[in-house]
Amino acid sequence: MINKWRPDLVYVTDDDAQEYVTKFFINSNIPFVFSGVNKTPNYYGFDKSKNITGVLEREHFIESINLLKKLVPNIKKIVIIFDDADMWYDIKERMMMQTKKFNDIEFFWETIHSFEEYKNKIKKYQNIADAIGTIGIFNFKDKNNQNVPYQEVLKWTVENSKLPDFSFWVDRVYFGTLCAVTVSEYEQGLSAGKIAYQILVEGKRPNEIPVAPTIKGKPIINIKRAKNLGLKIDSEILLSIETINKYQWEQYGL
């Protein structure tokens, strides 16, 4: 389709789009602008490309932990959950590097392969950890080797875990995670749009525009989850943060 239409510019978002589309147009005559990319540009070969630039997605780990500590000040042990998908490797590496900022917290790192294992681990950590980071939860399989939707994983977590939890994405908070400082979709799109403007209107070449992440994150709390956990949130925090007052699955009768 792209070869047939020959558009003036192609906007591509998320890592899958780079893997299955963008990397096949490296050094073509069509400019590509990406956003929402977690892996480094050289992973896809973009560092050697003249026609591709864009906006990286970088998780707000330090900010999310600081928000969690405001809600639960006595946290000492946090378990971080990943499924076994390759997409989490770079995120995990960046997170592990940043744990040095928290000398008062011990982090446990779990790579989990099935939904049953996830449930067992969450139950185990109820008496060991003070909080959970639900980061990689897309790739869990049930007993029939069928993928378990992450929304179902989060619903089970809300119903079976009494530990405060955090993540990096707003949809997780809508489905029951306590809090996150999320990557702003607005900031990602705005930055990508500004890059497209520089290319289409100002005449800049993509390789003249450096690849960079957006800086600003958006703090968000699920108030219903906080109440279910018995947390009392300071009014000053509530005045300066986005809040959600329900679980998304209730809207759909799940």
Image: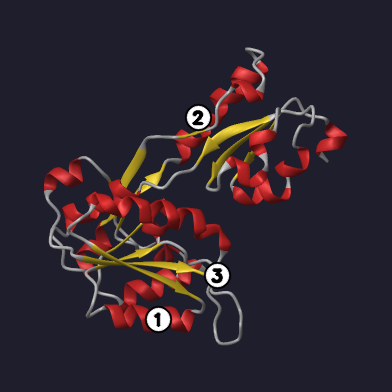
* Point 30% across, 51% down: residue: 64
Q: Quadrant of residue 53?
A: top right
Q: Tell me whether circle 2 and circle 1 mark residues in contact (CB < 8 Å).
A: no
Crowd band around label 3 with a 10 angstrom C-alpha radius: few (<14), some (14–19), many (20+): some
Q: Quadrant of residue 36?
A: top right
Q: Report the residue that reaches farthest toward the right.
A: 4
Identify the residue position indicated by label 3 in the image.
139
The amino acid at mark 2 is Leu
Above or below: residue 50 compared with residue 42: above
Q: Give the image location of residue 124, x and y in percent.
A: 30, 83
Q: Residue 119 — which label?
A: 1
From the image, state whether disc 2 or disc 3 is nearer to you.
3
* Point 34% across, 78% down: residue: 122
As helix, strand or loop, the secondary structure at mark 2 comes to: helix
Left or right, residue 164 beside residue 41: left
Q: Give the image location of residue 41, x and y in percent.
A: 59, 40
